[in-house]
Amino acid sequence: MDERVREHAEVLVDWSARVEAGDDVVVSVAEAAHELGVAVAEALGERGATVTTLYGSDELSRAYLKGAEAGVDGNGDGDDDNGDGAAADNAVPTFDDDPAVDRAIFEAADVYLRIGGGRNTTATADVSSETRQAYAKARKGVREARMDTDWVSTVHPTRSLAQQAGMAYEEYQDFVYDAVLRDWEALADEMAQMKAVLDAGEEVRIVTERDDAPDTDVTMSIAGRTAVNSAASVAYDSHNLPSGEVFTAPYDTEGEAFFDVPMTIDATRVRDVRLVFEAGEVVDFSAETGEEALASVLDTDAGARRLGELGIGMNRGIDRFTDSILFDEKMGDTVHMAVGRAYDACLPDGESGNDSAVHVDMISDVSERSRMEVDGEVVQRNGTFRWEAGFEE
Amino acid sequence: MDERVREHAEVLVDWSARVEAGDDVVVSVAEAAHELGVAVAEALGERGATVTTLYGSDELSRAYLKGAEAGVDGNGDGDDDNGDGAAADNAVPTFDDDPAVDRAIFEAADVYLRIGGGRNTTATADVSSETRQAYAKARKGVREARMDTDWVSTVHPTRSLAQQAGMAYEEYQDFVYDAVLRDWEALADEMAQMKAVLDAGEEVRIVTERDDAPDTDVTMSIAGRTAVNSAASVAYDSHNLPSGEVFTAPYDTEGEAFFDVPMTIDATRVRDVRLVFEAGEVVDFSAETGEEALASVLDTDAGARRLGELGIGMNRGIDRFTDSILFDEKMGDTVHMAVGRAYDACLPDGESGNDSAVHVDMISDVSERSRMEVDGEVVQRNGTFRWEAGFEE
């Protein structure tokens, strides 16, 4: 076994999930993540934890959902077999909205470790979006119970993910381990400085003036909001490995922002997005590619036109776009803004932030000719933070 | 997908487990059983069941148990790291004897489907038997909760199982599907005749007089005992797919029995076993190969020297020994006797039968020069039952 697999397991179990003897740990292992699953099981045995292993197979999920579609239709031939008058080929299955076993699992679990890494990132492509939504809706209670555990999501580098990233397999393995095997303690300390600036600040302004792209000049209020130091550990309210971002929940956004890092919305590639904000709302937008998918997101509900998140990527182990939000939004020298839902952790107790059914992150490269100001003071210029060597006042 | 995989899934879900809409079904998928897992998930979706999938990986189990061993030892180097004076390399880990998540799973589940089929039948070979026993002991409550569901155990034909059977992969697939894809309704009807004979009978005598093997001439009482028609369905109190045997719980065994079908006890091949019974107890024994392993079984406890089961193999789809008890004991033209624990289903309500920590099946070929008598009447001669064409009175 590649020694890095073992190190990844140890970071996950010790730094991220803080597993202790006696913890009841649920591990979900994706189809091609067996090797990391083995390393994690060994580490959990060593720590004296109790383990239950789920099989996180996209192909099984797809088969189950397609089976449910065929069940509604009777035999899957698209005819109205049961004579209920419903157009059979549009029939949406119903799912138990209180699934007893899954609820019991997450109510009993202390820790949930999700190890992604399948064999085909489009394994569920032919399941209708209505069926997906019906299933997701029925699983709301399970999702909430899962969120109440000390949960951490990571991925094992697989050939399928390498392909999605446009990389060779070994190249992608190096990329993932550069992102995951960091000195998290040191990064958490550095990010604490960024969090302190945001927590004390009232207004953020981000400006980019590059020759090859439309300008960004956007301001937003962060008064009263709390930033999260997302250091890849439940001890920091951070549930992704890798992580490495500081994020908060802005409001009253004004100005124009341009996002040059590509992204995927509902299987559609979207790039070069421009958003124009007035009084906190998107009043104009465009995208060089995938504008329709962007429009559909912004039209979801009222909250989808307002920002729910401003995030500052600080993981310098991530140095390229790989079409995976787990990595992309934490890339060093980037900032991202998400339209849609805000995270409760950023809000005063009992207050609710921007509400929406969506949360879609958009990323800007800030490595060149850019600056971020908090209350008029430059915090980051051309990707370099003010506490770093080489920062130009 | 091989159409037989889909048929296997349908037999498992419909005939064996009797899954209905709304059932909470837990499926355990072994490492190389993905394809059958997919077919089962699809069938469960069609039936309107709710599904939770466990990953039944022997390699993960081995890693967890080895990790637990290393945890006791401190760092797995065999030294007495914690200074407790215990010989570290003999240190046995302790396990939570009330594992909350697994107990919750099986208490909430209606149906449990175990799909075996790994990549290496000896994947856990280097886990000490003390550790295994400690783990098995801690899982007693989970095992009992699992037994309270409508559970069914089957296997997907894998290369590893083909290798254990000494067969080519495609040859083994044909073998498995011949055993599994039967007309179970018809076999259940045929086996009902055998059950009726045993339920009405008081004494069974089995005789073989082959030139190439020691004689068998053994009698046992079955008065007051109830036979199980093991027709591969929970509707018949039968939890294996394939099944195809009728079994009961005999007592007061007298005489000599010879078992020519090879078997594996604790990873030791044992063959040509001879047992001599007096007043229900084994008073003498021998084995051509593996006699020590046999002796160790018989010395486990008092019940290990008495029979717990007499079974009549009636699945003619199984026509050869494959070193897997799931198949071997159901082979047509065989009978088997097990030393050790009796099944409650064979006993009058509230009565307990032979008790023991072990249950080890031993199998005899009865296809030639053999007969089975119940209360003096021949029921089976040379493998042919008295209701079959060609039976010689």
Image (cartoon, coloured by chain):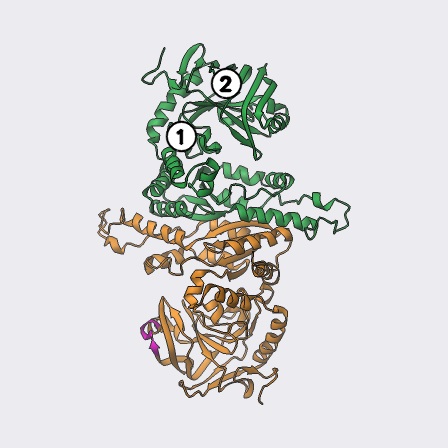
Chain colours: A green, B orange
The C terminus of chain A sits in image quarter: top left
Against B183, residue A376 (above or below) is: above
Q: Which residue is mark 2?
A: A213
Amino acid type at circle 1 is Ile
Left or right of residue A190, residue B89 in this image: left
User: Can you identify the residue that label 1 sits on?
Assistant: A318
The magenta region covers B287-293
Residue closer to the observer: A305 or A235: A305
Q: Name which residue lies at 78% across and 46% down.
A: A85
For image coordinates 38% across by 22% down, the residue present is: A192
Q: Chain of mark 2?
A: A
Judging depth in this view, the residue of A142 and A250 nearest the camera is A250
Near mark 1 (Cα within 10 A), the count class, few <14, some 14-19 or many ≥20, is many
Residue A207 rendering spot, x and y as whole percentages = 47, 14
Question: Which amino acid type is marked by label 2?
Answer: Ala
> Considering the numbered disc 1 on the image, is that residue within a helix, a strand or a loop?
loop
Toward the viewer: B159 or B71?
Answer: B159
Mark 2 closeness class: few <14, some 14–19, many ≥20 residues within 10 Å: few
